[in-house]
C-alpha cells in the first residue's frame, strides 16, 4: 500500500517578500518522512482571502492531509481561519471552548482579553482544536486540513500533536553515497541502477566545494537491506568505497 | 500601475523529503522585491513529469513571470526541461549552441563529453539560453518561464542575469517597528491604522524571546516618506519610541 500523501501551505506575505525565511516546511517535511507520510507539494501564498481559499481547496482535494502555517494571530492580517472556513463552506465564529482557554490564560497573565485576542477563538464550525502548549491560542483541524501557527516553536508543537493522530505508512529511509565525481560521469551507472531497482528511488544532488565537483547520491526506500545493497552496487560501479 | 507579478517553482524530491533546505526561494524573493516585482506564490513539487507540467501551466497563466529551480542536471531524475517543454507544447532536443558551450567546457577540463552531459544541452524549441558562469550548463527562458539550476551558487547567477532583463515597478520598501507588546494589544491600533492608510501594507510578525512576547510590525510601500509617517503614528499610538 502506498504511503499517505500530504501538502504544506504556508500563508504569509512576509515569506514572499523575503523578509522572513520559512523554516516550517523543512520541519514538517522531516516529521512526515519519519512518520511514513509523503510530502508531495508545498505552497506559499500571500495574505489574500481568495488565494488562500483556492489553495486550500486544490490541495485538500489532491492529497490525504494538508498542513497550513501562519495567519491565525489576533491582527487584521490574520485571515486564515476565515479563508479555511470559506474553503469548506463552514461558518466561522468565536467558539466557547477556545474562548475559555484564552480567557483563563490572559486572566492568569493579568492581561486584558480584548476583541483582538478574542479573534483567536474564531474557529470554523465542525473543526477540532489543536492544542498550543506554548501560547495557548489553538490551531484547528477541519476535514483533512490542519491549521497551525506560523511561529516555529508553536508550529513544531502542533505538528507533533497532529502527526501522532495520523496513521502513516512505513517510514521512508535513506542511504547516501558522497562522491567527488562530476554528475556527468555518475549519470550512466546511476540511471542503469535506477532502471534495475524500481523499489528504490535514486537521486543525485550535486555540489561544488572549492572548485571540486561532487554529488550526494541518495537512495530512498522502506527496506534498509535493499538500500544498503543498491548503494553498495553503485559504489562498486563508480569505483569508490562506501563506508 | 501595479508591479509585475511572479511565482517560484522549486522542483525536487530532496526538498520535500526534508533532506535539503530550500534557500533559493528566499534569495529570489529578496531579489524580486528589490527589483519591484511582486512574488505572489511559491510552490515545491516532486520530480514527477505530470506534476511539474501542471504547476508550470498554472503559474505561467496566473503570473507575469515564473522562475523554476532544480532538475536541469545530467542524471535520470533531471526532467525539468522535458516537463517545461511539454507545458508549452515545444519539442525538446540537443541544441547546437548549448552543446558547443558544454563541449568546449569539458574539452578544456579534459573530461569526456558523454551522453549524460549532452543531456544538459537538451533545450525546448524556441527557448533563449540563460548564461551559467559557474558550471556552464545553461538555463533557459521559454514564454514567461525562466528555468534555472537548483545549486544555489548557479541559481543566484542566473537570477541576476534574468532580472536584469525584466522591467519591474517601483521597489517595495519597508520600515519596521519592533515592540515588546503582545499582538493582542497591538491589533486594535494597528487595524485602525491599516484602514486609514490603504497605500501602506501593514503586517505584524510576532516573536517570543525568553518568555517575553513581542512583534515586528512591518510597513511596506513604495514611498519612504509615507512609510516613516505611518510607523511614527503607530509608535505614538502604542506609546513606544521609534528611532
Image (tube, coloured by chain):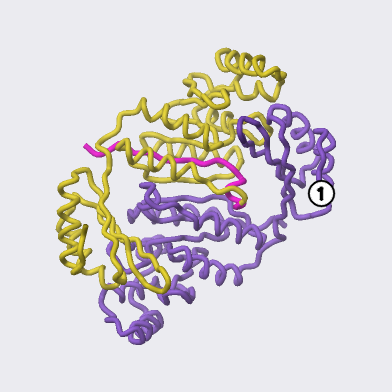
Chain colours: A purple, B yellow
Against A126, residue A144 (above or below) is above
Q: How many neighbours does mark 1 have within 10 angstroms: few (below 14), some (14-19), or many (20 or more)?
A: some
Asked if residue A126 can be seen in this view, the reply is no
Does A153 appear above or below A17?
Answer: below
B74 horizontally vs B57: left or right: right
- Determine whether A34 is above or below B161 in the image: below
- A44 or B182: nearer the viewer: B182
Q: Position of residue A223 (x, y in %)?
A: 79, 54
The mark tally for this picture is 1
> In x, y percent, where is residue B130?
48, 24
Quadrant in the picture for residue A104: bottom left
- Is A143 inside the magenta-drawn segment? no
Residue at image point 34% right, 28% down: B166
Magenta region, residue range: B1-18
Going by the image, does B51 lie left or right of A134? right
- Which residue does the numbered mark 1 point to in the structure image? A228
User: Is B15 in the magenta?
Assistant: yes
Q: Quadrant of the C terminus of chain B?
A: bottom left
Identify the residue at horizontal 72%, vertical 57% (top origin). Answer: A1
In the image, is B190 to the left or to the right of B160? left
In the foreground, A67 or A124 = A67
Indicate the quadrant containing the N terminus of chain B: top left, top right, bottom left or bottom right. Answer: top left
Q: Residue at x 47, y 29 (%)?
A: B158
Where residue B65 sits, quadrant-wise, is top left
Q: Dot 1: what SS?
A: helix
Q: Chain of mark 1?
A: A
Which residue is more in the foreground, A186 or A71? A186
Residue B115 horizontal/vertical position (percent): 71, 21
Question: Residue B229 versus residue B48: which sits nearer the camera?
Answer: B229
Q: Can I make out residue A157 in this image? A: yes
Amino acid at each position: 500500500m502506498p504511503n499517505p500523501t500530504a501538502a504544506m501551505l504556508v500563508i504569509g506575505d512576509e515569506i514572499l517578500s523575503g523578509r522572513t525565511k520559512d523554516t516550517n516546511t523543512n520541519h514538517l517535511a522531516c516529521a512526515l518522512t519519519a512518520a511514513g507520510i509523503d510530502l508531495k507539494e508545498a505552497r506559499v501564498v500571500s495574505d489574500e482571502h481568495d488565494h488562500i481559499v483556492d489553495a486550500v481547496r486544490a490541495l485538500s482535494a489532491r492529497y490525504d492531509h494538508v498542513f497550513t502555517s501562519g495567519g491565525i494571530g489576533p491582527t487584521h492580517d490574520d485571515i486564515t481561519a476565515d479563508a479555511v472556513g470559506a474553503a469548506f463552506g463552514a461558518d466561522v465564529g468565536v467558539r466557547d471552548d477556545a474562548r475559555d482557554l484564552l480567557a483563563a490564560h490572559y486572566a492568569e497573565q493579568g492581561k486584558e482579553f480584548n476583541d483582538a485576542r478574542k479573534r483567536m477563538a474564531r474557529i470554523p464550525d465542525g473543526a477540532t482544536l489543536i492544542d498550543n502548549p506554548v501560547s495557548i491560542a489553538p490551531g484547528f483541524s477541519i476535514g483533512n486540513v490542519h491549521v497551525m501557527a506560523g511561529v516555529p516553536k508553536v508550529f513544531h508543537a502542533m505538528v507533533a500533536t497532529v502527526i501522532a493522530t495520523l496513521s502513516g505508512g512505513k517510514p521512508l529511509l535513506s542511504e547516501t553515497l558522497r562522491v567527488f565525481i562530476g554528475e556527468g560521469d555518475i549519470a550512466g551507472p546511476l540511471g542503469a541502477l535506477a532502471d534495475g531497482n524500481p523499489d528504490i528511488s535514486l537521486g543525485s544532488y550535486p555540489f561544488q566545494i572549492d572548485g571540486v565537483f561532487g554529488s550526494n547520491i541518495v537512495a530512498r526506500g522502506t527496506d534498509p537491506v535493499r538500500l544498503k545493497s543498491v548503494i553498495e552496487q553503485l559504489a562498486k560501479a563508480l569505483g569508490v568505497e562506501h563506508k
